Image: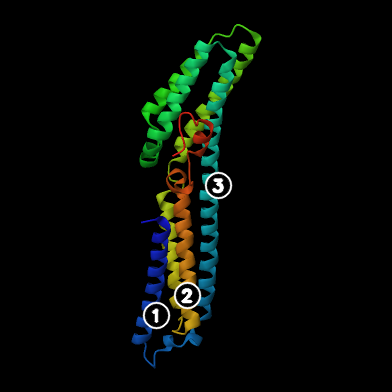
Amino acid sequence: MSDWFTLLLLIIATCAVIFVIVQLRHRRATVHDQAADPSETPDVIEYMTMMVGVVYAIVLGLAIAGVWEERGAAEEWVRQEAQALHELGERAQAFPAASQEGVRESVQAYVGYTVDEEWPYMIDNEGLSEEGDLLFAAVRQSVAALEPFTAPESYAYEGMHHQLATASEARTSRGMSAESTLPGVVWLGLITGAVVVVGMLFALQIRRTGRELLLAGLFSALIVFLLYLIWHFDAPFARGLSDSTEAFRTLFPQVLPDE
């Protein structure tokens, strides 16, 4: 079942619940029940409903901005890591063929493992694997083993250490981005707030007119969609990015052929 189909089912279920609750309220209401008259809704309830809606809208906006920013950061860390590793192989051309081969083999071994093995591990465990750390250490050792003798080699060697530091930072940040952006307490607040905001609709005593039911359904569907959007981008590598390994596949086609 796709995520979008799940979202559609949630929206339909939410609208159905709103409709059923409205119908039940009106069946239980009596002619003498003052609450059944929408014109008798106290002003304080309308004011509270407005304030709760505004506060919750601000919280939703901050949550969406946070997960979207983290999604962009995760994508950028992957791009930087792949680019830095690609530059290692390119700068290694300044050294003799034997030295070049050692660097390229270690980089290709790391890239192949990262995309094929570590990526699923990172998504499931929200962290980096020990095997990936060992392979990256092997890349570091292959660069450290180089011995520059000429000026071009010295220049390339210095640049390779800079790219290695960039790749190391990007790898560490990628592992941190694999974790959920929003803590559990924030999710508790978002879900509780959604229940309160939707529940406030009934404090306004909506009737069974088509217009009011349509507005109540659209409002509830919007809340569900926004919560789904936050959940979708809360895990950039699992759901937020359409192809989170695209940068590696683009720069290392010989290691990662197109599927």
Q: Is residue 163 left or right of residue 181?
A: right
Under mark 2, the amino acid is Ala
Under mark 1, the amino acid is Val
Using the image, determine if residue 142 lies above or below residue 21: above
On the rendered image, what quadrant is the N terminus found in? bottom left
- In the rendered image, residue 98, in percent from the top left (x then y), is placed at 50, 11
Q: Which mark is residue 69?
A: 3
Q: Is residue 259 left or right of residue 94?
A: left
Q: Residue at x 47, y 65 (%)?
A: 223
Spatial separation of the CA atoms under disc 3 and disc 2? 31 Å
Q: Which mark is residue 134?
A: none
- In the rendered image, residue 147, in percent from the top left (x then y), is placed at 55, 8
* Residue at the extreme right of the image, as rendered: 151
Using the image, determine if residue 183 lies above or below residue 161: below
Are circles 1 and 2 on residues that touch, CB within 8 Å? Answer: yes
Q: Residue at x 48, y 50 (%)?
A: 233
SS at badge 3:
helix
Q: Which mark is residue 22?
A: 1
Crowd rating for badge 1 (residues with CA inside 10 Å; few <14, some 14–19, many 20+): some
